[in-house]
Image (cartoon, rainbow, N blue to C red):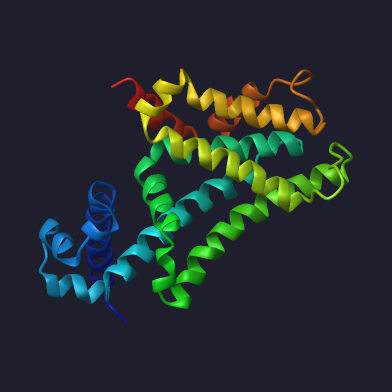
Amino acid sequence: MAAPWKERELQRREEEILRVARQLLLDHGYFGMTMDRIAAGIEYSKGTLYQHFASKEDVLCALALESEVKRKEFFERAAQFSGNARERMTAIGAAYELYFRLHPTYFRSEQMIHSQELLTKISQERRDQVMVCGARCHELMTGIIADAQTARQLHLPGGMTPGTLAFILWSLTSGAYLNMADPGHLEQMGVVNAIEAVRMACQTLLDGLGWRPLSSEHDYFAVASRAYAEIFPKETAEVFLAANR
């Protein structure tokens, strides 16, 4: 077993490698993120780089896993929010928003990785680790929706399952956040406050499905604010500081 100081050094090296690799992926795309460029951007030799990652695809999988783990942690914390099912789903939405606002490079690189279907080039074991994290987020959302059904606060239309509704909410938010990566594009569409638009779209969808209490009966923007304060005080402060720099 490696000494504690050695383990910390190895972890620090890997974090530095992934930081450089993620920025290269964002700046130059998949083909521009080469092992040579990664090695040039870190303070270690190329040989040291290969001690941590066997290939570019191996680095790519580590980037995807890093993003998925971070988002899963946010979702798991939000799922413990004290409130009814729709309030807990609102807290999940707040968690996803904070994840996006605090880690935009995570979100953008994750979308880039999945859209190019590059994970097919990586070992099944590492691919499974990425999929488990994503499945966990979907599972948390599905569980909250099922709780709403059990409490008779939500009656889904025929053919729609909790898993389907979770997928729809996921797709709505992820698609919107992907568009937010290009502020110029939003400006052309006349979108002034994209974050608020996502919140309103999700609540409008849930109102349309009759998920009670409806937004006309309950202030879900206040619920989101409470979730920030109670579950994510440190992260919320970071967002506020970044916005006022």
Figure check: 14 above or below 50: above
Q: Nearer the viewer, residue 210 or 143?
A: 210
Q: Residue at x 81, y 42 (%)?
A: 148
The percent position of residue 107, horizontal first and vertical second, equals 42, 46
Decide: is 136 above or below 7.
Answer: above
Relative to 180, 83 lies left or right = right
Give the percent coordinates (x, y) of residue 155. 87, 40
Query: Number of labelled discs?
Result: 0
**In the figure, residue 66 lies in which quadrant?**
bottom left
- Viewer-proximal residue among 114 and 104: 114
Q: For the point 64% across and 45% down, which residue is it? A: 79
Can the viewer see residue 80? no
Is residue 5 depicted above or below 201 in this figure?
below
Quarter holding the C terminus is: top left
Left or right relative to 24: residue 86: right
* Position in image of residue 93 (x %, y %): 59, 37
